[in-house]
Image: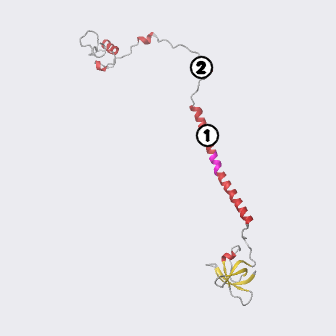
Amino acid sequence: MEKGTLVRWNAEKGFGFIKPDATNNQDVFIHISALKQMARKPVVGDQINYFSEQQSDGKIKAIKANIEGVAIVAASPNRRDNKRNGQYNSQYKRKSSSGLLLPLLVVLGLGIFGFKKYEELTATPVLTNQDVESIEWQPPAQQSNSFANKPQFKCDGKTHCSQMRSCAEAKFYNSNCPGTKMDGDHDGIPCERQWCN
């Protein structure tokens, strides 16, 4: 490694020049990228340790440099670090996807539970042979005579045959309701042309 003193530095553009400690050497160009692992940016007067490389135009450039007395924050990652970072990233992805998966599973479970309850509430009961055998059959009740004697029709203002639906209705209206005009020949049979022929 070579040593030198930083004699010029352009903080805005991130480059400068090192005056090598060895005599009769030209100034060495240095870019901020050669010092990327340092805890602070360089200032004029810093002692710089560096490896040099000659460029195609004949100028010398510093590569892999450090500032003497300043801590190195981040060393370049090796394969092992990359592997660890990959493991961390995959663990993070697994955790984030499991964080999303759990609420989805809860919602799915609640949906299934709700659907089962809905089916139970709306299910039609199915009779088995055993249920049918246990049912006691009773004959239908006989209609009482009081229901049979009740009139099926009532006077509600109908007076003409065109308003009737049957011969029985026409006969009821003709004999029980005043003001009907259904028996034109006065023979006691109403609506002879439409219903009672």
Residue located 44% across and 11% down the image: 146
Residue 159 disc label: none
Q: Which of 79 and 172 is in front in this view?
A: 79
- Estimate how packed mark 2 is, as few (under 14), some (14 to 19) or many (20 or more) residues with alpha carbons within 10 Å: few
**Distance between the alpha carbons at the discs numbered 1 and 2:** 33 Å
- Estimate how packed mark 1 is, as few (under 14), some (14 to 19) or many (20 or more) residues with alpha carbons within 10 Å: few
- The residue where tag 1 is placed is 112
Instruction: State the image quarter where residue 62 is shown.
Output: bottom right
- The residue where tag 2 is placed is 132
Residue interval drawn in magenta: 100-105
Q: Can residue 159 be seen in this view?
A: no
Q: Can residue 187 be seen in this view?
A: yes
Q: Which of 76 and 135 is in front in this view?
A: 76
Locate residue 147 relative to residue 64 in the image: left or right.
left
Residue located 75% across and 82% down the image: 2
Residue type at tag 1: Ile
Q: Which residue lies furthest to the left in this view?
A: 185
Helix, strand or loop status at disc 2: helix
Residue located 73% across and 67% down the image: 78
Instruction: State the image quarter where residue 18 is shown.
Output: bottom right
Locate residue 186, reporting x and y percent.
25, 10
Locate residue 120, reporting x and y percent.
60, 32
Residue 172 in magenta stretch: no
Residue 102 in magenta stretch: yes
Helix, strand or loop status at disc 1: helix
Please tell me which of labels 1 and 2 falls first in the chain: 1
Of helix, strand and loop, which mostly describes the magenta segment?
helix
Locate residue 3, reporting x and y percent.
74, 83
